[in-house]
Image: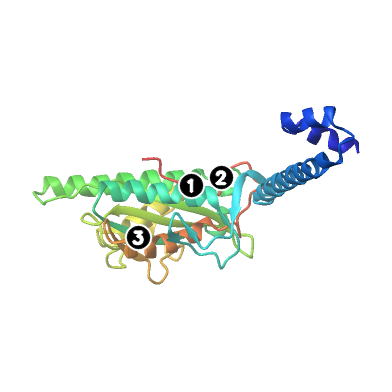
Amino acid sequence: MGGLIPIFATLSPDLTIKNSVCMNNINIYPYLIAEIIDLLQAQQNLCQSQQQTIMNRHPLNPNLRLTDASSYSGLPIQNTHGPMIDNFLGSSYRCFERTIEQYSRVSMLRFDLHLPEHCGNCTLLDNTVLDRFFSSLKAKIAHAQRQSRESGHRVHETEVRYLWAREISATGRVHYHIALLLNHDAYAHFGQYDLASSNMYSRIHQAWASALHMYEMDVLGLIHIPENAIYFIKRNDKSSLEDAFHRASYLCKADSKDFQKKFHCFGSSRI
Protein backbone atom coordinates (compact mmCIF):
# COMPACT_ATOMS: atom_id res chain seq x y z
CA MET A 1 0.00 0.00 0.00
CA GLY A 2 2.97 2.33 0.55
CA GLY A 3 3.49 2.52 -3.22
CA LEU A 4 0.07 4.13 -3.62
CA ILE A 5 0.89 7.14 -1.42
CA PRO A 6 2.35 9.21 -4.29
CA ILE A 7 -0.73 8.41 -6.35
CA PHE A 8 -3.12 9.56 -3.61
CA ALA A 9 -1.06 12.74 -3.40
CA THR A 10 -1.90 13.45 -7.04
CA LEU A 11 -5.66 12.96 -6.69
CA SER A 12 -7.85 15.93 -7.55
CA PRO A 13 -8.69 18.28 -4.63
CA ASP A 14 -12.39 17.50 -4.89
CA LEU A 15 -11.82 13.82 -4.39
CA THR A 16 -9.36 14.24 -1.52
CA ILE A 17 -11.81 16.55 0.26
CA LYS A 18 -14.62 14.10 -0.27
CA ASN A 19 -12.31 11.37 0.94
CA SER A 20 -11.53 13.19 4.20
CA VAL A 21 -15.12 14.20 4.87
CA CYS A 22 -16.93 11.11 3.68
CA MET A 23 -14.53 8.24 4.29
CA ASN A 24 -17.45 6.10 5.40
CA ASN A 25 -19.47 6.98 2.34
CA ILE A 26 -19.09 3.97 0.09
CA ASN A 27 -20.29 5.97 -2.93
CA ILE A 28 -16.93 7.77 -3.13
CA TYR A 29 -14.84 4.65 -3.67
CA PRO A 30 -15.75 4.03 -7.31
CA TYR A 31 -14.49 7.53 -8.15
CA LEU A 32 -11.28 7.00 -6.20
CA ILE A 33 -10.65 3.64 -7.80
CA ALA A 34 -11.28 5.03 -11.30
CA GLU A 35 -8.83 7.88 -10.79
CA ILE A 36 -6.20 5.55 -9.31
CA ILE A 37 -6.53 3.24 -12.31
CA ASP A 38 -6.09 6.20 -14.68
CA LEU A 39 -3.00 7.37 -12.81
CA LEU A 40 -1.49 3.87 -12.78
CA GLN A 41 -2.07 3.56 -16.53
CA ALA A 42 -0.43 6.94 -17.12
CA GLN A 43 2.60 5.91 -15.06
CA GLN A 44 2.83 2.61 -16.94
CA ASN A 45 2.72 4.41 -20.29
CA LEU A 46 5.47 6.78 -19.13
CA CYS A 47 7.67 3.89 -18.03
CA GLN A 48 7.16 2.12 -21.35
CA SER A 49 8.02 5.29 -23.23
CA GLN A 50 11.21 5.77 -21.19
CA GLN A 51 12.14 2.13 -21.68
CA GLN A 52 11.63 2.44 -25.43
CA THR A 53 13.89 5.51 -25.47
CA ILE A 54 16.62 3.59 -23.67
CA MET A 55 16.27 0.61 -26.00
CA ASN A 56 16.70 2.93 -28.99
CA ARG A 57 20.09 4.14 -27.77
CA HIS A 58 23.19 2.44 -29.12
CA PRO A 59 24.59 0.21 -26.35
CA LEU A 60 28.17 1.36 -27.01
CA ASN A 61 27.34 5.03 -27.43
CA PRO A 62 24.14 6.26 -25.76
CA ASN A 63 24.41 9.56 -27.64
CA LEU A 64 23.48 7.72 -30.83
CA ARG A 65 19.86 6.80 -31.53
CA LEU A 66 19.00 3.60 -33.38
CA THR A 67 16.06 3.34 -35.74
CA ASP A 68 14.58 0.55 -37.82
CA ALA A 69 12.27 2.89 -39.74
CA SER A 70 12.00 2.59 -43.50
CA SER A 71 12.19 6.34 -44.11
CA TYR A 72 13.64 9.55 -42.72
CA SER A 73 11.77 12.83 -43.09
CA GLY A 74 9.72 11.29 -45.87
CA LEU A 75 12.70 9.89 -47.78
CA PRO A 76 13.31 6.12 -48.11
CA ILE A 77 16.37 4.63 -46.42
CA GLN A 78 18.17 1.28 -46.58
CA ASN A 79 17.04 -0.57 -43.47
CA THR A 80 17.76 -4.08 -44.76
CA HIS A 81 21.25 -4.01 -43.21
CA GLY A 82 19.98 -3.71 -39.66
CA PRO A 83 19.34 -0.62 -37.50
CA MET A 84 20.32 2.79 -38.78
CA ILE A 85 21.80 5.65 -36.74
CA ASP A 86 19.20 8.40 -36.58
CA ASN A 87 21.86 11.06 -35.84
CA PHE A 88 23.73 10.16 -39.03
CA LEU A 89 20.54 10.28 -41.08
CA GLY A 90 19.89 13.76 -39.74
CA SER A 91 23.37 14.96 -40.70
CA SER A 92 22.95 13.45 -44.17
CA TYR A 93 19.57 15.07 -44.64
CA ARG A 94 20.92 18.50 -43.70
CA CYS A 95 23.86 18.09 -46.07
CA PHE A 96 21.49 17.26 -48.94
CA GLU A 97 19.22 20.12 -47.93
CA ARG A 98 22.00 22.73 -47.93
CA THR A 99 23.31 21.57 -51.30
CA ILE A 100 19.90 21.60 -52.98
CA GLU A 101 19.17 25.03 -51.53
CA GLN A 102 22.35 26.33 -53.16
CA TYR A 103 22.13 24.49 -56.50
CA SER A 104 19.03 23.58 -58.47
CA ARG A 105 20.88 20.60 -59.93
CA VAL A 106 23.15 18.39 -57.83
CA SER A 107 25.42 15.45 -58.59
CA MET A 108 26.11 12.75 -56.03
CA LEU A 109 29.18 10.57 -56.63
CA ARG A 110 29.62 7.38 -54.57
CA PHE A 111 32.95 5.63 -54.10
CA ASP A 112 34.98 3.79 -51.47
CA LEU A 113 38.51 4.39 -50.22
CA HIS A 114 40.64 1.44 -49.10
CA LEU A 115 43.96 1.37 -47.31
CA PRO A 116 47.05 -0.50 -48.47
CA GLU A 117 48.20 -3.39 -46.31
CA HIS A 118 51.26 -1.55 -45.04
CA CYS A 119 49.09 1.34 -43.87
CA GLY A 120 47.05 -0.58 -41.31
CA ASN A 121 48.21 1.75 -38.55
CA CYS A 122 47.15 4.90 -40.44
CA THR A 123 43.69 4.82 -38.96
CA LEU A 124 44.21 3.16 -35.60
CA LEU A 125 44.12 6.40 -33.64
CA ASP A 126 42.11 8.84 -35.77
CA ASN A 127 40.77 9.73 -39.22
CA THR A 128 43.53 12.17 -40.13
CA VAL A 129 44.15 10.38 -43.42
CA LEU A 130 40.58 11.17 -44.46
CA ASP A 131 40.98 14.82 -43.47
CA ARG A 132 44.03 14.98 -45.71
CA PHE A 133 42.06 13.40 -48.55
CA PHE A 134 39.25 15.96 -48.48
CA SER A 135 41.69 18.87 -48.10
CA SER A 136 43.64 17.65 -51.11
CA LEU A 137 40.53 17.00 -53.21
CA LYS A 138 39.13 20.48 -52.50
CA ALA A 139 42.46 22.06 -53.43
CA LYS A 140 42.65 20.10 -56.70
CA ILE A 141 39.09 21.04 -57.67
CA ALA A 142 39.77 24.70 -56.89
CA HIS A 143 43.01 24.57 -58.92
CA ALA A 144 41.28 22.96 -61.90
CA GLN A 145 38.52 25.57 -61.87
CA ARG A 146 41.02 28.39 -61.57
CA GLN A 147 42.96 27.06 -64.57
CA SER A 148 39.78 26.77 -66.65
CA ARG A 149 38.79 30.31 -65.72
CA GLU A 150 42.23 31.66 -66.66
CA SER A 151 41.95 29.84 -69.99
CA GLY A 152 38.78 31.75 -70.77
CA HIS A 153 36.36 28.89 -70.20
CA ARG A 154 33.05 29.33 -68.46
CA VAL A 155 33.31 27.88 -64.96
CA HIS A 156 30.45 26.83 -62.68
CA GLU A 157 31.49 27.19 -59.07
CA THR A 158 30.82 24.38 -56.61
CA GLU A 159 31.13 23.75 -52.93
CA VAL A 160 32.53 20.31 -52.11
CA ARG A 161 30.07 18.74 -49.70
CA TYR A 162 30.36 15.15 -48.61
CA LEU A 163 29.30 12.32 -46.33
CA TRP A 164 31.67 9.63 -45.12
CA ALA A 165 31.48 6.47 -43.06
CA ARG A 166 34.33 4.51 -41.56
CA GLU A 167 33.72 0.76 -41.46
CA ILE A 168 35.58 -2.42 -40.61
CA SER A 169 35.51 -5.32 -43.05
CA ALA A 170 35.11 -8.98 -42.07
CA THR A 171 38.91 -9.27 -42.22
CA GLY A 172 39.39 -6.34 -39.85
CA ARG A 173 40.47 -3.83 -42.50
CA VAL A 174 39.35 -0.20 -42.33
CA HIS A 175 37.71 1.38 -45.36
CA TYR A 176 35.70 4.53 -46.01
CA HIS A 177 32.44 4.97 -47.90
CA ILE A 178 32.16 8.39 -49.52
CA ALA A 179 29.32 10.37 -51.09
CA LEU A 180 30.26 13.66 -52.78
CA LEU A 181 27.59 16.30 -53.38
CA LEU A 182 28.52 18.82 -56.07
CA ASN A 183 26.98 21.40 -58.35
CA HIS A 184 25.84 19.30 -61.31
CA ASP A 185 26.69 22.12 -63.72
CA ALA A 186 30.29 21.92 -62.54
CA TYR A 187 30.73 18.14 -62.26
CA ALA A 188 28.23 15.62 -63.53
CA HIS A 189 30.28 12.40 -63.46
CA PHE A 190 33.68 10.86 -62.73
CA GLY A 191 34.87 11.14 -66.30
CA GLN A 192 36.99 8.62 -68.12
CA TYR A 193 38.65 6.06 -65.88
CA ASP A 194 42.13 7.22 -66.83
CA LEU A 195 44.70 8.75 -64.48
CA ALA A 196 46.08 10.85 -67.34
CA SER A 197 42.75 12.64 -67.76
CA SER A 198 41.96 15.88 -66.00
CA ASN A 199 38.69 14.82 -64.42
CA MET A 200 37.12 13.81 -61.12
CA TYR A 201 38.37 10.22 -61.42
CA SER A 202 42.01 11.29 -61.58
CA ARG A 203 41.59 13.98 -58.90
CA ILE A 204 40.13 11.48 -56.44
CA HIS A 205 43.09 9.16 -57.06
CA GLN A 206 45.56 12.03 -56.73
CA ALA A 207 43.95 13.18 -53.48
CA TRP A 208 43.97 9.69 -51.95
CA ALA A 209 47.61 9.21 -53.00
CA SER A 210 48.46 12.54 -51.38
CA ALA A 211 46.64 11.57 -48.17
CA LEU A 212 48.54 8.27 -48.00
CA HIS A 213 51.87 9.85 -48.99
CA MET A 214 52.04 7.50 -51.97
CA TYR A 215 52.45 7.79 -55.73
CA GLU A 216 49.30 8.12 -57.78
CA MET A 217 49.88 4.84 -59.64
CA ASP A 218 50.27 3.00 -56.34
CA VAL A 219 46.69 3.70 -55.23
CA LEU A 220 45.13 2.01 -58.25
CA GLY A 221 42.85 -0.67 -56.86
CA LEU A 222 42.43 1.17 -53.56
CA ILE A 223 39.52 3.25 -54.85
CA HIS A 224 36.34 1.38 -55.67
CA ILE A 225 33.57 2.95 -57.73
CA PRO A 226 30.47 0.75 -57.38
CA GLU A 227 27.72 0.24 -59.92
CA ASN A 228 25.21 3.07 -60.27
CA ALA A 229 27.59 5.42 -58.49
CA ILE A 230 26.26 8.66 -60.03
CA TYR A 231 22.98 10.35 -59.08
CA PHE A 232 21.44 13.45 -60.61
CA ILE A 233 19.22 15.39 -58.19
CA LYS A 234 16.89 18.15 -59.33
CA ARG A 235 15.55 20.60 -56.77
CA ASN A 236 11.87 20.15 -57.59
CA ASP A 237 12.06 16.46 -58.45
CA LYS A 238 11.45 14.53 -55.23
CA SER A 239 11.98 11.14 -56.87
CA SER A 240 15.55 12.07 -57.82
CA LEU A 241 16.23 13.08 -54.20
CA GLU A 242 14.63 9.89 -52.91
CA ASP A 243 16.89 7.73 -55.08
CA ALA A 244 20.07 9.53 -54.01
CA PHE A 245 19.19 9.71 -50.31
CA HIS A 246 18.26 6.04 -50.27
CA ARG A 247 21.68 5.19 -51.69
CA ALA A 248 23.53 7.52 -49.33
CA SER A 249 21.66 6.19 -46.29
CA TYR A 250 23.78 3.03 -46.50
CA LEU A 251 26.51 5.07 -44.81
CA CYS A 252 24.23 5.51 -41.78
CA LYS A 253 23.85 1.84 -40.86
CA ALA A 254 25.12 0.75 -37.45
CA ASP A 255 26.58 -2.50 -38.75
CA SER A 256 30.36 -2.75 -39.43
CA LYS A 257 31.20 0.38 -37.46
CA ASP A 258 33.52 0.41 -34.46
CA PHE A 259 31.85 2.53 -31.79
CA GLN A 260 34.35 1.63 -29.08
CA LYS A 261 37.07 3.93 -30.39
CA LYS A 262 37.35 7.54 -29.26
CA PHE A 263 36.96 8.98 -32.76
CA HIS A 264 34.09 9.32 -35.20
CA CYS A 265 32.95 6.63 -37.63
CA PHE A 266 30.69 8.99 -39.60
CA GLY A 267 30.97 12.58 -40.70
CA SER A 268 29.69 15.22 -43.08
CA SER A 269 30.88 18.53 -44.43
CA ARG A 270 29.99 21.51 -42.26
CA ILE A 271 29.36 24.04 -45.02
Q: Earlier in the sequence, mark 3 or mark 1?
A: 3
Label 2: few (<14), some (14–19) or many (≥20) C-alpha neighbours in 10 Å: some
Q: CA distance from mark 3 to mark 1?
A: 20 Å
Q: Earlier in the sequence, mark 3 or mark 2?
A: 3
> Are the residues tagged 3 and 1 within 8 Å (C-beta)?
no
Under tag 1, what secondary structure? strand
Q: Secondary structure at mark 3?
A: helix
Relative placement, left or right, of 170 versus 175 is right
How packed mark 1 is, by other alpha carbons closer than 10 Å (few <14, some 14-19, many 20 or more), is: some
Q: Residue at x 67, y 48 (%)?
A: 49
Residue drawn at the location 11% of the way across and 51% of the way down: 154
Pointer 3 and pointer 2: residues touching (CB < 8 Å)?
Answer: no
Residue tagged by mark 2?
264
- Furthest toward the bottom, the residue is 227
| Residue mark closest to the camera, 3 vs 1 | 3
Q: Please determine whether, in this image, residue 230 is positioned above or below residue 265.
A: below
Q: What kind of element bears circle 2?
A: loop
Q: Which residue is mark 3?
A: 241
- Direction from residue 25 to residue 158 in the image, left or right: left
Q: Residue 267 got which mark?
A: 1
- The one nearer the camera, 91 or 56, is 56
